[in-house]
Amino acid sequence: MAKQPAQLSPVISREERALRALSDEVLVAMVSGADDWHTEAAPDLGLDAVMMADGPHGLRKVNSASLADLQASEPATCFPTGSALAATWDPELVAEVGRAIGREAVAEGVGVVLGPAVNLKRHPAAGRNFEYLSEDPLLAGELAVAWIDGVQGEGVGTSLKHFAVNNQEANRMVVDAIVDPATLRELYLSAFEAAVRRSQPATIMSAYNRLNGVYCSEDPWLLTDVLRTEWGFEGLVVTDWGANADRVAGIRAGQDLEMPGGHGTHDAALCLAMDDGSLPRAKVERCAQRVLTLMERNHVQRSAREDTPDGVPLATLHDEHHRLARTAAAAGTVLLANDGLLPLKPSTHVALIGEFAVRPRFQGGGSSQVKATRRDALLDELRLQVEPAGGRVQYAPGYVLSGRDDREGEAVRRIDEAVAVARRAEVAVVVVGLPDAAESEGFDRVHLHLPEEHNDLVNAVCAANPRTAVVLVAGSPVTMGWVDQPGAIVCAYLGGQAAGGALADVLVGAAEPGGRLAESFPVRAADVASDHWFPGEPHQVVYREGPYIGYRWFDAAGAQPLFGFGHGLSYAKLSLGEPELNTTRVDAAALLGLATSHNASDSDADGAHDTAVPTPVSHTVLGPAEVPAPGSGPVAFRVTVRLDNASKRAGTEVVQVYLEAPESATVGAPRRLAGFAKVAVEGKSTVDAVIDVHARALCHWDEALSGWAVASGTWGVLVGRSSRNPLARLEVEVSSPWRAPQPDPALEPYRHPRPDDWDPGEEAVEALLGRPVPTPLPVRPFSRNSTLEELATTAVGRPLLKLVRAVVARTAGGGDEGGLAVMVDRALGELPLRNLAVMSQGRVSMRTVDGLVAMANRVGRRKTPSG
Ligand code: BGC
């Protein structure tokens, strides 16, 4: 979106005048949507409504009146989902995907695409991990910046989501995520910070959950202090759909637009609050002004389904984008293991086993579900590549994806058939993975295993034919008890509508498996540092593991993942030379202007500081608005490393640079990604990879000083192809005016974690949080924020939940796509009562909700006098 130059005129704007002239009723209508997907229009100002549509891996422009009907949308290109796109480690390619999505949005009359989704993968079982990018904030931030720039470069807005700390599906609408300040700043907010400060998304979407006690959609610290004052966000804050709990508190906090809207659920409360003076009208006008600004900047015409502005027919665009989707899918495909089996010679006789090869699963369930323009099946695509070269592909389903086949011995018969086909072939390719019902928005996985029959199939085929490659179709890590058996393992993730073609390309070597894991694959869920505390209690999840997310845990604890962060193999014979640093000394003060900043803000002590930006109390740290955004600003040092390709075929590599901080900089997790480069190397040639490490990568959050500090000392600079086993370790000497405080002995469990029996203990957790662990909200007395499931423990709630389920079942659209049924079931059980009013399109009023709550509390009291 083109940025508008600031208006210097002292005269109030046309919009401000217009807003002041509005009645309270009309004004409050402006700050909630006109319906599920549009803002209100402002015809008097000549402004059309803006249409929003999901994201993030393609456009879901809904063409149904029912929010629950996730199938009803216009056809659009389905690109690889977040985990596959992130595995490309390729900002340029991600920007290209963003541009394509932006072009489709323009053609469809969509002004804002709801993405990117940048929450970190705290636990591999989290239901939306397939949509999210990474467990690492630097990588997630770089790719988010690229995606936003790509989409917005086409004149379409984006919505960075879900702000913030929305790392699980369980009870996502009520759960309170308790996170310590340093982990919050350094990890969970970091990708948002990069995207906001570097790309100015047109909108940001506040998350459903609470963060440290406050709903994200009502949190003045998050939505105003951090987002606007510190990061300089210029756009509009939109709620996640139905995320609003208390609208008056939301407006006070800086929550501009409520979605979906259209039924005036909160209008009366807002008018009342303006009337009694508890909500200044100017605050509502400010939010409405931002809605107007979004509409003013919206260049997308509302006339839907047209050719692109430059006259390219939509069908041509879809063809082009299908090809791009195929390139992106191959670039995000990770070759996890290979004993030389892959790539296959096209003349091979292949046994292709697994129903995914004919019924591709290429995206996850939920709001991101795109109605693809086509879908490539691996079986067809592999035949296209192999048969002309004299090869042959024989198919056996191996398992069934839809429904249950309970006939005695059927599962065994299918495996026997697959084994027979595998025996006759030169090579077997077994495609296994997570079915729709196992992985979706709306619920977390309960374990990381593949379906039992998929594991049985892999074991049986590997035993029958030692030349077996396993292809994994899943949006997130799975366990692999059989890991040592196949000759090759390919993680195809959920590769979008062209995944079948891309996989065929990778299997025969027409394309390089370009992916590297953007997340760790654990051997078992229990190996993940957050496992004991995921997903927590219904109303509270305490991030007791602190900074130990993903590889930060495996590397610090010396624990072995199944496949480490950054891992992935090439078909080419690539080797890294000796890395070189352009300097081994870093003067943090000079680089970041710490001393200058001190001089400039000496006047702060006299109270002369006149902005609202929190100022560091010491010159040894940078204030949150002064520190460069992640991935930008002054470069601390540059790493150059030569990449040599000894083979004839071209290859790609992701060269990764990690920093190892001195102990004083961190309570744990010293190793962190600090820079990377995706490099393509032609056959028999060499290329220099150049990676700039920004000074920001050296910064850590000092809560006591409310600023970003740099620790002096020797920093390790690790260069390699994954966070595990770096190929080289260099050092830089960093000097900084910041002095580390005396280490707090209570934090010892974080400093030297014991992986065998990991629990930092209450004292350490409280020292990390800087306060006692808050008591979770009691289930009783019930309130608007109680869930339908909680209420269903009473005689009032039971029939209510039944009724709501029946009503939704009627509108949820036909065809159970597996995950959808589970998602709807979970979503309804965990629906807070307040959302009955918001989501029922005006049928249930807030007064009715309050009435139900009062009744349930009375019933509760009668039944259990003590409770
Ligand atoms: C999801 C968002 C999505 C919105 C609109 C919500 O349930 O959390 O990611 O953009 O619905 O479909």
Image (cartoon, rainbow, N blue to C red):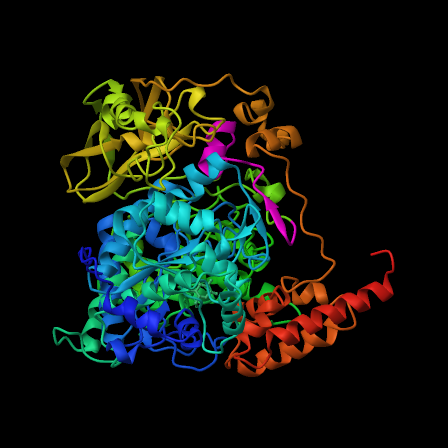
Q: Is residue 192 something that shows in the picture?
A: yes
State left or right for residue 748 relative to residue 552: right
- Where is residue 37, by image quadrant? bottom left
Q: Position of residue 110 (x, y in %)?
A: 29, 72
Q: Position of residue 366 (x, y in %)?
A: 47, 67
Which image quadrant shows ligand 1? bottom left
Q: Is residue 396 something that shows in the picture?
A: no
In the figure, 664 relative to 417: above or below?
above
The residue depicted at 29 percent of the width and 43 percent of the height is 570
Along the line of sight, the residue nearer the viewer: 292 or 866:
292
State left or right for residue 836 relative to residue 620: right
State left or right for residue 287 relative to residue 153: right
- Where is residue 188, by image quadrant? top left
How many numbered circles does the render carry? 0
Along the line of sight, the residue nearer the viewer: 216 or 729:
216
Q: Quadrant of the C terminus?
A: bottom right
Magenta-colored span: 537-560
In the figure, 505 relative to 721: above or below?
below
The residue depicted at 67 percent of the width and 79 percent of the height is 803
Along the line of sight, the residue nearer the viewer: 803 or 37:
37
Q: Position of residue 150 (x, y in %)?
A: 23, 57
In the figure, 534 relative to 783: above or below?
above
Q: Quadrant of the N terminus?
A: bottom left
Q: Is residue 865 magenta?
A: no
